[in-house]
Image (tube, rainbow, N blue to C red):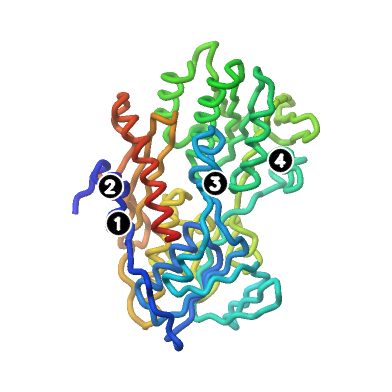
Amino acid sequence: MQYNRRQFIRQIAAGSSLLLTGCSGLQVKKSYSAHVVVVGGGFAGATAAKTIRQLDDTIKVTLIEPKSRYVTCPGSNWVLAGLTSLDSIRFSYQRLSTAYGIDVIAEQVESVDAEKQTLVLANQDQINYDRLIMAPGIDFNWDSIDGYSAEAANQIPHAWQAGRQTEILLQQIHAMPDNGLIVISAPANPFRCPPGPYERASLLAYYCQRHKPRAKILILDHKRGFSKQALFMQGWRRNYGYGTEQSLIEWQSITDNPVIAVSVKDKTLLTDFGDQIKADVLNIIPAQKAGQIAASSGLTDNSGWCPVQPDTAESTLRDKIHVIGDAAIYPGIPKSAFAANSEAKACAMAVVHLLKDKQPPEPVWMNTCFSLLTPQQGISVAMVYKLNQQQQIYKVKGAGGVSSRTDSQSLHREAQIARNWYKSITRNTFS
């Protein structure tokens, strides 16, 4: 089947079969053929739990997630620009429980014993599993910038895990002087949502245009380039005067002069060459790694991420444990919500087959990522991925790409599709 980018995005926006919509009202079985435990209730974990029940309702599925409601990172930049509210990007697990018979446990996982196939929760309850799916998301390399820490993030927010952090950054934006300087420190690859810092800068510029027109946004980037760079810069020129003295946004690559320290009290960054950058609002997005439970369970390598066999998502370091979403290493596939959703479905299919001693089908993964330049202008990147004979992931030729048209009508249409995509993927994951 030949895909092109327009067909791909159109299908996503419509919530088509690419998103594997499924049945509801499953009857809970009194006895089960196997037990699958899923740790983490984000786009990867929730999707995997739901999909397994859709594929085989004789399999018991337990979803363990300490938060009762999940706040999505997609859409959180929209909150900062005043386009939506935090409540609108919060989702509960009620439907997964009532409609799909998933046992949802609001608790923290304390440890995993891969040999005994057992988890211990923070309340000391023990849970046995036949297969374990880990979707722990990200954690931060706090020591990558001297002076930055989880405690410091309460004053210098990263807002890269949506919720309270989003609120802190929003409050600081509103409180800053009309001529304030917002500094965003963007990390080196790999990290969650590669286009995210640049959508954030775009929408903060949109906010400042209307409420703090003398403000400036400075992006200090620990990379030489970034996702959809040409499209972002074109949008910045169109909307925010980029490249002129009046530009609301300035982007600087600091690969050769990285940020090495922060003074939390003064909101000042120090670079390797001794430069000091003082901000009114400082948004540090730290370097990242797999969630802590992945590391303590022996699932991470020296990179800090979790290596997996791409055909099944099974860990290369621990048997019968699968890792999906941002924590996993899928070479070439970005760490995005849609990729996590896609990886979860492929993993769920593999797990169901493995529990029946059957060969899993060959996986196909998909990704799309929309970014808003303004509420009325959007851009996107999309791709389909498969495995070659050497079990290496490759991009399917002609299956995706970045936005090819940047006229006003096309940008407006992509912004509309971005909103529809968000509704579709959250419904597909949590409903």
Residue type at mark 2? Answer: Phe
In terms of depth relative to the viewer, which is nearer, 369 or 226?
369
Residue at image mark 3: 191
Q: Residue at x 45, y 37 (%)?
A: 227
Query: Which mark, residue 8?
Result: 2
Q: Quadrant of residue 374?
A: top left
Q: Earlier in the sequence, mark 2 or mark 4?
A: 2
Residue at image mark 1: 18
Left or right of 112 on screen, residue 379: left
The answer to whether residue 76 is above or below residue 176 is below
The answer to whether residue 364 is above or below residue 147 is below
Residue 317 seen by the camera: no
The answer to whether residue 342 is above or below residue 403 is below
Asked if the residue under mark 1 is in contact with the one under mark 2, i.e. CB atoms within 8 Å, the reply is yes
Q: Residue at x 39, y 41 (%)?
A: 419
Residue type at mark 1? Answer: Leu
Element under disc 3: loop
Q: CA distance from mark 1 to mark 4?
A: 41 Å
Viewer-side label of 3, 1: 1
